Image: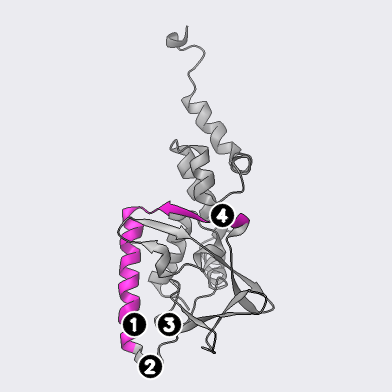
Amino acid sequence: LLSRRQRQMCIRDRYKCGLRLGEVFGLMWEDIDFDNGTLNINRQVQIHNNKWFLENPKYDSFRTIELDNTTLSELKKMYEHQKDCEQYYNEYYNNIYCETLNDGSKFITYDPGNSCEVLHLVQVRDDGSWIQPRAMMHCFRVIHNKLGFSELDFHSLRHTHASVLLANGADVKYVQERLGHKNVATTLDIYTHVTDTCLLYTSPSPRDPKTS
């Protein structure tokens, strides 16, 4: 189960940052620059044969995005809370490791092994155990069944983030880079309804005397 803070942070990362699901759950504290208010997208998590692997972001879309003040503040609180939990649980705190296979692939494990490195993942429970992306499936089942929003899923938050940016006049190239789309054409194709609406409201009317 997730705490209220953990659920809020998972959703906030998606809604306010436009991250993909695997990127949200692959975040590490070293990816966050608290001084400059930025977040580096360096990896995603993907499951193969019941093991969670650390992989490059989709389309190798490594990028740095700016964080709003509220998100940055919440992340700072989450970081401090996690440090407090480490001290509280002490030797019972779950450390998470990354094991590298012969082919260079890396997967998440609780076994320290000989060639493992410690991971400082953002999305963990109070006892240090890692929160898997599947946890959000339960959250959205509640949203679907109890709140009645049957069409809303976790990916909808990413779409909302992009739509809000475009509707407020953000450059399409900026949105493409922030979301990590393969190219601008992909962004335009997905969000053409938003850009068309923006043009409708920003283009001068043919009856406007200023255009005559």
Start-end of magenta stretch: 59-88
Which mark's residue is nearer the viewer, 4 or 2? 4
Mark 2 = which residue?
Answer: 91
Lateral position of residue 136 relative to residue 7, left or right:
right
Mark 1 = which residue?
Answer: 85
What distance separates the C-alpha of mark 2 from that of mark 3? Answer: 11 Å
Disc number for residue 128? 3
Lateral position of residue 34 relative to residue 45, left or right:
left
What distance separates the C-alpha of mark 4 from that of mark 3? Answer: 28 Å
Q: Which is nearer the N-term, disc 4 or disc 3?
A: 4
Viewer-closest of 167 and 91:
91
Mark 4 = which residue?
Answer: 61
Q: SS of the residue at dot 2?
A: helix
Q: SS of the residue at dot 3?
A: loop
Q: Which is nearer the N-term, disc 1 or disc 3?
A: 1
Viewer-closest of 53 and 202:
53
Amino acid type, mark 2: Glu
Callout 2 environment at 10 Å: few (<14), some (14 to 19), or many (20+)?
few
Q: Splitting the image into 4 quarters, where does residue 50 fall?
A: bottom right
Check the image and report above or below for 6 versus 109: above
What distance separates the C-alpha of mark 1 from that of mark 3? Answer: 8 Å
Callout 3 environment at 10 Å: few (<14), some (14 to 19), or many (20+)?
many
Q: SS of the residue at dot 4?
A: loop
Q: Do labels 4 and 3 touch, CB within 8 Å?
A: no
Magenta-drawn stretch contains 82? yes
Tell me the chief SS of the magenta region: helix
Q: Do labels 1 and 3 touch, CB within 8 Å?
A: yes
Residue 106 position, x and y percent, is 59, 75
